[in-house]
Image (spheres, rainbow, N blue to C red):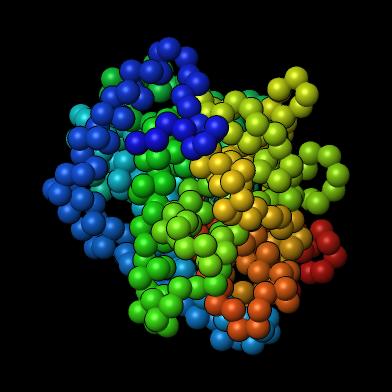
Amino acid sequence: MKAYFGDFGGRFVPELLAPPLTELEEAMRRWLPDPGFREELDGLLRDYAGRPSPLTFCPRLSEDLGINLWLKREDLLHGGSHKINNTLGQGLLARRIGKTTLAAETGAGQHGVATAMAAARLGMESLIFMGEADVERQSSNVLRMRLMGSGVVSVKDGTRTLKDAINEALRHWIATQKTTHYCFGTAAGPHPFPSLVAEFQSVIGGEIREEFLKKSGKLPDAVVACVGGGSNAIGAFRAFLADKDVALVGVEAAGTGEPGCHNSAPLNLGSPGILHGQFSMLLQDKEGQVLPSHSVSAGLDYPGVGPEHSHLRAVGRVRYDLANDDEAIEAFRLLSLREGIIPALESSHALAWVAKNARNLKKGANVVVNLSGRGDKDLGIYGNHRGRSGEGTG
Ligand SMILES: Cc1ncc(COP(=O)(O)O)c(C=O)c1O
């Protein structure tokens, strides 16, 4: 189990957090290879979450763009996003260690919802930390969490978004570690979380590979995913890292697209630094103070990113590029209109990149976009954004 990916990763935490992280690392070593654990997780992924998720061809957008566009349908999983892959895995692990409560941070609310689901299903308590700004912009998910029995703590510090929710959840974990497992929602944070979350999410890329080979007898030309903390992207990419002919593209949020710090793109616009227990790319000022991030999508609104992505960028295996708020909103509209699929605003960034770059790809290239979530939660934001830009809600 790797603590570092090249120069990036590590475990930069207060001494008080070392015991539960070591306990978790030991539990991973003990239980992840265990056939009984795997069987229980696979059963839940299949019968409760709805795996395998389909690989859907998009005939109309493919024609528009001159490529073959495929979607990995994580939006069709129970709860509406890829986050359930990770929470079921961590929930089972936490139960084996003897914890009774799952605590979690959430931005878009999807990880909070997925944690609440896992806790309800596994007979555990759950407590979700969410920035006040995200509580407002993703209110339908707050209702879902509460309905499934979760406490939701609205965090009023800092930018009142994901970064601040993680700070508060880590503080809570220090005080409650005997009974609580911190169910981290993305492939970032202190070791072993980046490895653990990537392990649970890599089911995505494994299925893309198998399904695509079955459908066409070859591998896709490109796999594209949005990058917040990095879990759906690393989950989609891992199975293809050794296949040099498969282009891997991670898409960060360029935010408003204006100069200055109105983005959530540490891989493209940040520098190496420490946040939330890891050394990785980060939006920070010259003194190392973390800068506020911005994205129209709450799930990408984070100034940091997981260490494996920083490494894959440094060695040039994955291309990391940008899509801004307006481009994501337009992609949200386009997929809804042309294919009858309403994507999450997070995933819309990956679609926007494909729409922008299709003309630079070879004609007929097979491009798989990881559709990490569904967009019901984002309808209000879409309406407001279109209203503000004077276009109506179209
Ligand atoms: C649907 C969806 N996609 C993507 C993300 C970004 O997270 P990650 O980069 O860990 O996949 C989120 C986060 O909340 C999300 O809800």
* Residue drawn at x 40%, y 13% as measured from the top left: 16
Residue at x-position 31% and y-position 30%: 25
Q: Position of residue 215 (x, y in %)?
A: 39, 82
**Who is closer to the viewer here, 155 or 25?**
25
Direction from residue 273 to residue 15 in the image, left or right: left
User: Is residue 121 positioned above or below 381 on the image?
Assistant: above
Residue 380 screen position, x and y as percent:
65, 58
Q: Position of residue 122 (x, y in %)?
A: 23, 44
Percent x, y for residue 337? 64, 79
Q: What residue is shown at x 46% (from left), y 24% (from top)?
A: 11
Q: Quadrant of residue 17?
A: top left
Quadrant of the frame with the N terminus: top left
Residue 31 lies in what quarter of the image?
top left
Q: Given the current orientation, which residue lies at the most extreme top position? A: 15
The reply to whether residue 19 is visible in this rendering is yes
Relative depth, front residue between 185 and 132? 185
Res 204 visible: no
**Relative to 377, does residue 220 appear above or below in the rendering?**
below
Locate the C terminus by quadrant.
Answer: bottom right
